[in-house]
Amino acid sequence: MTAPDRQVPPDVVTFGETMAALRARGALRLGGSLGLSVAGAESNVAIGLARLGHRVRWAGRVGADELGALVLRTLRAENIDTGHAVTDDTGRPTGLLLTEPRLGTLTRVSYYRAGSAGSAVSPADVLPALAPGTRVLHLTGITPALGPSAADAALTAAATAHESGITVCLDVNYRSRLWSADQARTALRPMLAHVDLLIASEDELPLVLERPAADEPEAVDSIVSAGVREVVVKRGAHGATSFTADGASDCAARQVDAVDLVGAGDAFVAGYLSGLLDGADIPARLRRAVTTAAFAVATRGDWEGLPTRDELSLFDQPDGTTIR
């Protein structure tokens, strides 16, 4: 695998906090071994897109510590351009999360990210990553939840990219342990003026509305009237729906035995943006998105099981197939 050519503009730029991730096999209070990896919604999407053959640049901050080195090393190993990532020299550490399986596919996540390097990301850190020729800026609602500097970075980047003709994608990705619904609404609603593609689960749509909507169609109409060209609603095991001014398009989910649901939404976004970058129509984008999401839920880890482009067709193979 060759390193990304920084002279060629990326297809996608994204930024946010990527943390060290400690994964338990059982309840944390019982002790036992932990597996060490990295995790972050935006970097999950970046890895998914890179594996599908797209040029991706990740910007953000990590601590000047071994966990920050792990984050950057992992992203570089996945062929992601980290040339605009900042190593914080003020003593802020790399953030940390712990995951523990509690009931079937129900997983509990604990965050240790207050005062982290990632929470201090600023517009000055991320704007230089938006090179001319960039096609998509991908953001999530997690970043503005991290603090004032990160919120400023997200809003400023969205406005700058939109003014430059870059498609801006926002995945709401609400985290109740980071902020309240009212706080999310206050921060996310102003971003809609700069967003072209909004992705959200059904229960996240109200977080970007100025006032309550009677039903989903009314909510979507309100979002589109704010200037968003397309709204994609993730429905988990029930698939997804894309709404545009021309109407709605539904796609059923791929049927798989779920092992780990963490990271499924990020995998969906990676698949959808991949289809968009390839010029696919909306039904084809949705099919790729539910396919990449299925890979995520069928394997453990936030991003480890994401497919390469030539693996997308594996779902068309009969059950029990062995590829030799």
Image: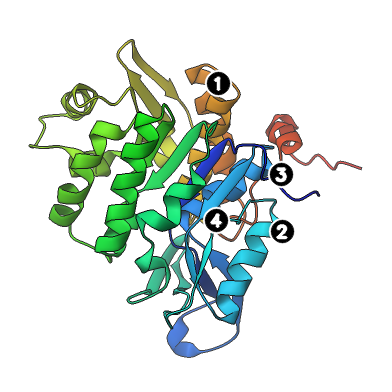
What secondary structure is marked by label 1? helix
Disc 3 versus disc 2: nearer the observer: 3
Q: Secondary structure at mark 4?
A: loop
Q: Badge 4 is on which residue?
A: 84
The mark nearer the N terminus, 1 or 3, is 3
Q: Which residue is mark 2?
A: 77
Residue 149 position, x and y percent, is 29, 62
Residue furthest to the left: 211
Farthest-out residue, right: 324
Compared with residue 256, is residue 194 higher up or lower down, i.e. above or below?
A: above
Please name the residue that numbered disc 1 is placed on.
284
Q: Can you tell which of label 1 and label 2 is closer to the viewer?
A: 2
The amino acid pointed to by label 3 is: Asp
From the viewer's perspective, is 63 left or right of 109? right
Q: Measure the alpha-carbon separation of dots 1 and 3.
A: 29 Å
Q: Residue furthest top?
A: 246
| Disc nearer the start of the sequence (4/2) | 2
Residue at horizontal 86%, vertical 41%? Answer: 323
Camera-near label (1 vs 3) is 3
Q: CA distance from mark 3 to mark 4?
A: 13 Å
Residue 254 can be seen in this image:
no
C-alpha span from label 1 to label 2? 29 Å
Indicate which disc, 1 or 2, sits on the residue closer to the N terminus: 2
From what the image shows, is residue 300 above or below residue 289?
Answer: below
Please report whichever mark, 3 or 4, sits nearer to the chain's N-terminal start: 3
- Nearer the viewer's eye, disc 4 or disc 2? 4
Proximity of marks 1 and 2: CB atoms separated by less than 8 Å:
no
* Discs 3, 2 touching: Cβ within 8 Å: no
Query: Which amino acid lies under the numbered mark 4 shown in the image of this protein?
Result: His
Residue at (46, 80) in percent of width and height: 27
Q: Which of 267 and 68 lies nearest the eye of the viewer? A: 68
Mark 3 sits on what residue? 5
